[in-house]
Amino acid sequence: MDVSNIIESLKLIKPEIAVSASLILVLIFDLIFHKDKKLIPYVALLGLFATGYFVIHQFGTTGFGFATKSTFKAFGMVTVDSFGTFFKLLILISAVLVLFFSSFSDEIKKTTDRLGEYYVLIFGMILGMFLMVSATDFLLIYLSMELLSLSSYVLAGFTKLRDRNSEASLKYVIYGSVSSGLMLFGISIIYGLTGSTNLYVINSLIQSPQINVLALSFALILVMAGMGFKISAAPFHFWTPDVYEGSPITITAFLSVASKAAGFGLLIRFIKTGFAAMTLNNGYWMLNPIFDWKLIIVILAILTMTLGNFSALWQNNLKRMLAYSSIAHAGYLLLGLAVFSNQGIAAILIYFFVYMLMNLGAFLIVMLIADKLGSEDVDDYDGLGYTSPFLGISLAVFLVSLTGLPPTAGFIGKLYIFSALIDAKMFVVAVIGVLNSVVSLYYYIRVLKHMYLVKPKIQPVEIIPGLSQKFLVLLLVVPVLFFGIYFSPIVELAKNCVVLLGF
């Protein structure tokens, strides 16, 4: 790799460089102003806005970074395209919102002496996620996943206010280590079979009749274990409820959206780049027949959304309920992937955008209520809709949207997922998805029942959010309602990002 190649590659990873520079800047400010850390959140926010500038300018850009020369083509470790940029934008918006969440969170305020480390670790997560959605080489895939994982392990138990904080972090490390080991074992087998770690090269080599199909299939199952862990897909979801419940709410919200988005971005690119022979004129992918991806993804999707929804029915803790809800939504998103078409991927992008708004909104309301009540139990929400109408109505909007009912943006997300399934003639799978949505209605409405229909045993506390808190809630409520009625901009953006997919 010559110097000119490196310079051109660096131009393609400006957002990642901006995140790295912001991380270092936050660390320096933390060391210099260790007695007064009020500036650190502003420095972090400034870094995210600078990164956002580079991300927005990356839309429409395509190219391969850090490429090694091949006889036919230059294969890169990093692929820059609008598909990856879309996920980077989602991750960045989530990070900005979580930074604002953190400024209101009582949990984070109690750890002011370690505020610098908190923001440094968040930037570490962002850098790992940015690299994940662009990686097309197993070496970079694994390193970026580990960077994300190591940062999130620490953040899961960051506050140390309760025993469950340390428990969440420990369980996260154990499950993460096992899935990471399985994935690394699978990668080593694929390298042994093909002699390459680059997905583009592997795609061309696995079409050879000499490839050992049994060994390759076993290796792919192991790799899927690592990726399934990141997206909370069953049966790799066991960490999710405990970690979501034990982590600070700000980190729980970030993991539920940004980490999941990075995992799905990686999974989609992994399958399309490594195992799709071509894209047909109708937008459907022609996958190499050595591994039945459709069967595996459909089984994972049905298992994930069914287990997530039915497990959520018995949860009294709101964070734990939203954790199982997050697992169920991973199942719906996998349905879009199971179509293996550009339409299915566009549906995933649309779904992720609205999921970000409604899920972060739900966690924000739970955080504001928990800071006042000191509880996340659904029984403590009795009568809350009347004493705290602003938070009650806002939470109702987010929960209705998570269910997928009109006129909220959640309905649009599920509409495009099920439309993609119907167009692919996967009618049975679509019916199973709809039935799962009906099941989810029960546990979401149960929260509303407690807020509006259950008489409280004691006089409920009146929760009046501050002006800045109200503004942040409205910043999420309004788009959920607006995009439920006028959703063309999201749909057009998603379709353009799929068309420009750099394969």
Image: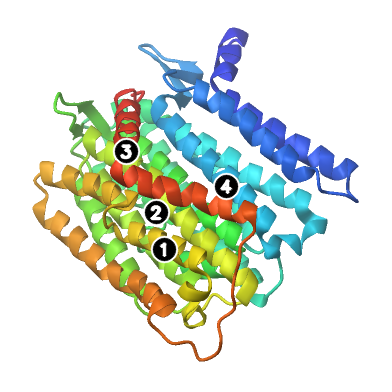
Residue with the most extreme top position:
4
Determine if residue 272 is in view.
Answer: yes
Residue with the most extreme bottom position:
457
Determine whether label 1 and label 3 are within 8 Å by CB: no
Looking at the image, tell me whether mark 1 or mark 4 is earlier in sequence order: 4
Determine whether label 2 and label 3 are within 8 Å by CB: no
Q: Secondary structure at mark 2?
A: helix
Amino acid on which the number 4 mark rests in the picture: Leu
Instruction: Give coordinates of residue 242: x percent, y percent.
Output: 52, 70
Amino acid on which the number 3 mark rests in the picture: Ile
Looking at the image, tell me whether mark 4 or mark 3 is earlier in sequence order: 4
Gap in angstroms between the C-alphas marked 2 and 1: 8 Å
Gap in angstroms between the C-alphas marked 1 and 3: 21 Å
158 lies above or below 270: below
Instruction: Give coordinates of residue 255: x percent, y percent.
Output: 52, 54
469 or 201: nearer the viewer? 469
205 or 347: nearer the viewer? 347
Looking at the image, tell me whether mark 2 or mark 1 is earlier in sequence order: 2
**Which disc number belongs to residue 97?**
4
Disc 1 or disc 4, which is closer to the eye?
4
What residue does disc 3 label? Answer: 271
**Which disc number belongs to residue 228?**
2
Q: Residue at x 69, y 34 (%)?
A: 46
Amino acid on which the number 2 mark rests in the picture: Gly
Determine whether label 2 and label 1 are within 8 Å by CB: yes
What residue does disc 1 label? Answer: 237
